[in-house]
Image: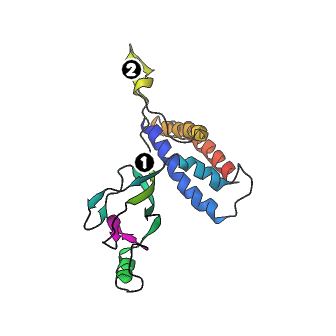
């Protein structure tokens, strides 16, 4: 279970690095082979949209959903709420022309939304949810561990990741079993698959 969860997390986190890398180069017009489209399809399984709950309504402080892995866009009445760091927020708040309004709301740390007088709407968050833990349940019968589907939770990743997950788990098992050959095979296979994707 530990290997499965680590392999799943490494694969999932790699999506975001790959988007950054492939976003820098030109895409292609082929319907089924543009890398950004493929990555977006894989991440789409985890995209969520949810109204935020308030910590303190008068202070316009909101909770980030517990299942949030990466926060995307916040919106209010169909308008995007711009994220500002503390310095930008100080500058914008002190400027009569740039001051946040209901038509141009902003937020800072801890999802504190400005202006403080927003009424009649909810703050909607778009985000990537956390991965659920993989569990391979089993029952010990005699001295054998037998798979138990009723107490198991499968991988959530896109089905195209099956080979990559097996290779990563193989390499992790080789490390634990102190089998350098197994680690080397897993690492080489992982590198071959990664190179094919990036060509």
Badge 1 element? loop
* Relative side of 39 to 175, left or right: right
Q: Do the residues labelled 1 and 2 touch (CB within 8 Å)?
A: no
Residue highlighted by disc 1: 130
Residue highlighted by disc 2: 139
The percent coordinates of residue 18 (x first, y second) are: 59, 56
Q: Relative to 65, does residue 143 appear above or below in the rendering?
A: above
Disc number placed over residue 15 in the picture, else none? none
Q: Of marks 1 and 2, which one's residue comes earlier in the chain?
A: 1
Q: Relative to 198, does residue 150 appear above or below in the rendering?
A: above
Q: Mark 1 or mark 2: which is in front? A: 1
**Quadrant in which residue 60 is drawn:** bottom left
Q: Residue at x 74, y 53 (%)?
A: 30
Distance between the alpha carbons at the discs numbered 1 and 2: 28 Å
Q: Give the range drawn in magenta.
A: 100-121
Quadrant containing the C terminus is bottom right
**Quadrant in which residue 62 is drawn:** bottom left
Which residue is at the front of the view, 140 or 82? 82
The percent coordinates of residue 29 (x first, y second) are: 74, 57
Q: Which residue is drawn at 59% across and 48% down?
A: 41
Q: Which residue is drawn at 63% across and 60% down?
A: 22
The percent coordinates of residue 196 (x first, y second) are: 69, 48
Badge 2 element? strand
Quadrant containing the N terminus is top left
Q: Relative to 36, does residue 80 appear above or below in the rendering?
A: below
Instruction: Tell me if residue 112 is in the magenta stretch.
Output: yes
Q: Which residue lies furthest to the front in this view?
A: 120
Q: Residue furthest right?
A: 30
How is the structure coloured here? rainbow
Which residue is at the front of the view, 127 or 197? 127
Mark 1 neighbour density, 10 Å: few (under 14) some (14–19) many (20 or more)? some
The percent coordinates of residue 165 (x first, y second) are: 55, 39
């Amino acid at each position: 279970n530990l290997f499965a969860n680590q392999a799943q997390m490494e694969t999932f986190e790699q999506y975001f690095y790959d988007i950054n890398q492939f976003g820098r180069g030109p895409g292609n017009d082929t319907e089924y082979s543009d890398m950004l489209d493929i990555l977006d399809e894989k991440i789409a399984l985890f995209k969520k949209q949810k109204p935020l709950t308030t910590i303190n309504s008068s202070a316009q402080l909101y909770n980030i959903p517990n299942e949030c892995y990466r926060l995307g866009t916040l919106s209010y009445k169909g308008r995007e709420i711009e994220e500002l760091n503390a310095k930008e927020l100080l500058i914008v708040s002190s400027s009569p022309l740039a001051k946040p309004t209901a038509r141009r709301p902003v937020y800072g740390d801890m999802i504190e939304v400005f202006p403080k007088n927003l009424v009649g709407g909810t703050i909607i968050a778009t985000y990537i949810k956390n991965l659920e833990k993989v569990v391979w349940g089993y029952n010990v019968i005699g001295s054998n561990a037998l798979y138990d589907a009723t107490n198991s939770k499968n991988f959530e990743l896109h089905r195209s990741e099956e080979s990559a997950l097996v290779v990563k788990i193989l390499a992790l098992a080789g490390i634990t079993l102190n089998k350098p050959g197994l680690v080397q095979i897993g690492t080489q296979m992982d590198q071959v698959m990664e190179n094919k994707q990036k060509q």
